[in-house]
Amino acid sequence: MLLPAPLKEPIVALIGDKCYVSLVEDFDLTDVPCIKYAISKALGFGIVLGGSIVKIPQILTIVSAGSARGLSLTSYILETLSCCITFSYNWRQGNPFSTYGETCFLTAQNIIITLLILFYAQRLSETTLTLVGYAAVLYGLTCVVPSWVMASLYAATIPLSLASKVPQIYTNFANKSTGQLSVFAVVNYFAGTTARVFTTMTELDDPLMLTGSVLASVLNGILMIQVFLYWGKKLEEEKPRKVE
């Protein structure tokens, strides 16, 4: 099947000439490697698209409630650092954007959420310092830190990913509630990290990235279970403080 150039060129750019000929022109449904590659590419860009909006509901939930109660500041700081390192490592490695692009958007959204947590806790001076700190970290990782150090830092994101999720999991367990945690964000984050396991296995030969993806999927799965386990349960209201 021949397609006009406006349709052909984006598909070729996505899956390459070989797989385009095999899957589109020859319609060879027995070409398993090309089918897996095409699915991986579609999933990859779907994850990137989803990553660009996945934390927006969480941001809106916080702003709408005027509160970030139930959200772990430690979790978001560690998760943001992990995203910064992951994005910088992949960008400097020259990996396809479809294999890591969501980390760019997740970094920005996590920074916003971290600042909102501090803002609604009335820790305004720390809000400014945190924003400056994140900017310095991103600049250092993308422009200053040597490549061999970046590889070591990326390896460190595996335990960092564990450390970023555990405080939120523990907070949910201790409160028997997920507070202002967004259901949409948790479910979509789990779906995205699970799909990322497949795309990493298909497109990259990088055990570090695969290990990180599997770990993220497992921990996000635990968070998703907690969301449904504690569905409808609210945090106890804080006692009003006395005005001195």
Image (spheres, rainbow, N blue to C red):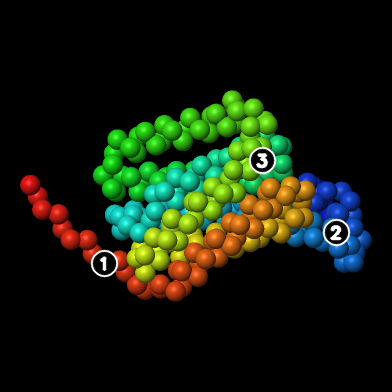
Q: Residues within 10 Å of mark 3 (few under 14, many from 20)?
A: many
Q: Which amino acid type is shown beneath numbered disc 2?
A: Pro
Q: Which mark is residue 33?
A: 2
Please name the amino acid that badge 1 sits on. Answer: Glu
Which residue is the site of mark 1?
236
Which residue carries the number 3 mark?
Answer: 90
Q: Earlier in the sequence, mark 1 or mark 2?
A: 2
| Residue at 54 percent of width and 29 percent of height | 139
Q: What is the three-letter code of the residue carrying label 3?
A: Asn
Neighbours of disc 1 within 10 Å: few (<14), some (14-19), many (20+):
few
Asked whether disc 2 touches disc 3, contact meaning CB atoms under 8 Å apart, the reply is: no
Q: Position of 226 compared to 36: left or right?
A: left
Which mark lies nearer to you, 1 or 2?
A: 1
- Residue 162: image x %, image y %? 54, 53
Residue drawn at x 29%, y 48% is 120
Q: CA distance from mark 1 to mark 2?
A: 53 Å
